[in-house]
């Protein structure tokens, strides 16, 4: 399953709930304000570092760049463009959007 | 009543009242419309020569982060506008320290000069205002 999170981890608990439900074999894609979760020096970065030991974490590059976060992205988070988003959605049998 | 003001009474009674306005910004810039709307209202209100301050707390601190490039999401990058506020005599910009630090940011990451305040200092600032507008 592909999990997407589009809310800031500071504003909503969508990321935490996603992380609590993401199983091995799935992937997480951060989009829109969700990309703030993948930035260095934050509490969510520590959680994602833990997550990335078992589950790949992606962030949508256009959303990262729009927010000025390009240089702050956590090591290990893979940046994808819109066609990469489509590839992920096609690769996993289902998509769960944590809104 | 004068010709030049289109009949609007501009004597001291009406034009002399300057109130302290605080705009409180708590949302990240592109996920919702709040940040842009706040900026629009600030610019409109600038025409009224009031005592304006802007506060950035919680995800609002992301509004003034350097290096925003929005071409990829096809949305207007309004962040350069914060730098133009100075030209409208809006020079009092405050960032809450706790919000900044929780996001791994420092004063150098902002595209405008700001004063960093603790939450307690921010609370004091809010208490001194005549009007508080929250976004």
Image (spheres, helix red, strand yellow):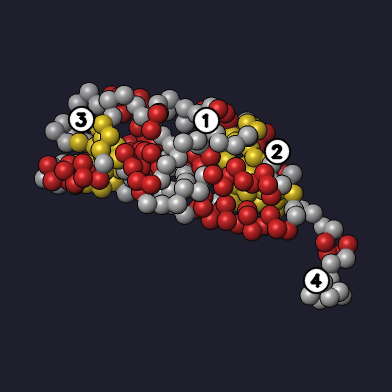
Left or right, residue B130 beside residue A81: right
Left or right, residue A9 beside residue A98: right
Identify residue for label 2.
B124
Tag on residue B5?
Answer: 4
Horizontal and vertical percent position of residue A72? 40, 28
Give me the residue at 85% from left, 58% from top.
B16
Please say if the residues under marks 1 and 2 sit with CB atoms less than 8 Å apart. no
Q: Chain of mark 2?
A: B
Give the alpha-carbon distance from disc 1 to disc 2, as whole Å: 25 Å
**How many C-alpha atoms fall within 10 Å of the one at disc 3: few (<14), some, or many (≥20)?**
some
Which of the two discs, 2 and 4, sits closer to the camera?
4
Q: Chain of mark 1?
A: B
Please say if the residues under marks 1 and 4 sit with CB atoms less than 8 Å apart. no
Give the alpha-carbon distance from disc 1 to disc 4, as whole Å: 44 Å
Horizontal and vertical percent position of residue B87? 68, 47
Give me the residue at 45% from left, 52% from top.
B76
């Amino acid at each position: 399953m592909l999990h997407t999170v589009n809310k800031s981890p500071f504003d909503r608990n969508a990321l935490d709930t996603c992380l609590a439900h993401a199983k091995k074999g799935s992937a997480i894609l951060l989009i829109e304000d969700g990309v703030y979760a993948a930035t260095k020096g934050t509490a969510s970065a520590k959680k994602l570092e833990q997550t990335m030991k078992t589950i790949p974490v992606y962030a949508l590059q256009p959303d990262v760049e729009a927010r000025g976060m390009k240089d702050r992205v956590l090591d290990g988070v893979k940046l994808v463009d819109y066609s990469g988003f489509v590839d992920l959605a096609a690769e996993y049998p289902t998509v769960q959007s944590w809104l | 009543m004068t010709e030049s003001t289109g009949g609007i009474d501009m004597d001291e009674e009406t034009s002399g009242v300057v109130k302290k306005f605080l705009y409180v910004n708590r949302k990240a810039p592109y996920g919702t419309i709040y940040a842009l709307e706040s900026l629009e209202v600030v610019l409109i209100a600038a025409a009224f020569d009031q005592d304006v301050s802007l506060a950035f707390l919680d995800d609002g601190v992301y509004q003034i982060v350097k290096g925003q490039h929005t071409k990829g999401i096809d949305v207007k990058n309004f962040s350069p506008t914060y730098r133009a506020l100075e030209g409208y005599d809006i020079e009092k910009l405050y960032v809450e320290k706790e919000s900044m630090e929780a996001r791994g940011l420092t004063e150098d990451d902002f595209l405008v000069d700001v004063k960093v305040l603790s939450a307690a200092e921010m609370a004091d600032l809010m208490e001194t205002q005549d009007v508080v507008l929250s976004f």
